[in-house]
Amino acid sequence: MPDHDDSPRTVTVHTCDHGPVTVWEPDWCTGSETEHQPGGYRVDITHASPDYEFTVSTGRGTPVVLRACFEQRPFTERPPGHVPFMNVEMDGDWHPHSSDDLRRLSESLTAHADRLRELADRLDGLTNAFNATKGNTPAAANPKKGLGG
């Protein structure tokens, strides 16, 4: 199989449809039971790297915003084909990405970051206006107004 690095490793997976199948295993593959589960179909053999987690720090901890891993499916007939790709988890689902797809995702995330900075500036304005009235809303400052009176 020509679409691999120079890893000398192979793994033999026992499949229900093709018996024992020996495949080259990339250096980045974890080789875990979920990728090389015996008894499955040959088309389901998957190589996957450890997850790369993209987190943010919050006042309530450090949640994972995105999760990604290298993946390859040497016997699939479906896109993205036999070549390695990056699988990106967003909103609870995994989405295959080529290198160009990752660049587009990066551009989208940069645009989202710009929008978040704009919203932070707007929040500053709202907070400053709130603080200027010392936390009083117009209805609270004049109880007769805003309460039907």
Image: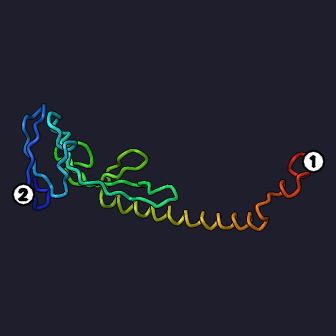
Q: Amino acid at mark 1?
A: Gly
| Tag shown at residue 62 | none
- Residue 112 lies left or right of residue 11; in this view the side is right
Task: Tell which residue pokes out farthest to the front in this image.
Answer: 60
Q: Residue 102, how many percent across, how many down?
A: 35, 60
Residue located 20% across and 39% down the image: 44
Residue located 52% across and 66% down the image: 114
- Residue 88 lies left or right of residue 15; in this view the side is right
Residue located 49% across and 64% down the image: 111
- Residue 104 lies left or right of residue 140; in this view the side is left
- Residue 88 lies left or right of residue 112; in this view the side is left
Q: Residue 107, how many percent across, how many down?
A: 43, 64
Q: Nearer the viewer, residue 77 or 126?
A: 126
Give whichever of discs 2 and 1 has the lower sequence position: 2
Rendered position, 41 above or below 72: above
Q: Where does label 2 land, which residue? A: 8
Where on the picture, by quarter, is residue 51? Answer: bottom left
| Tag shown at residue 149 | 1
Q: Residues within 10 Å of mark 1 (few under 14, many from 20)?
A: few
Q: Residue 52, how many percent across, how many down?
A: 32, 57
- The residues bearing labels 2 and 1 have C-alpha atoms spaced at a distance of 83 Å
Q: Nearer the viewer, residue 44 or 131?
A: 131
Q: Residue 79, how many percent across, how many down?
A: 27, 46
Rendered position, 105 above or below 34: below
Residue located 46% across and 65% down the image: 110
Q: Residues within 10 Å of mark 2 (few under 14, many from 20)?
A: few
Q: Nearer the viewer, residue 102 or 136?
A: 136
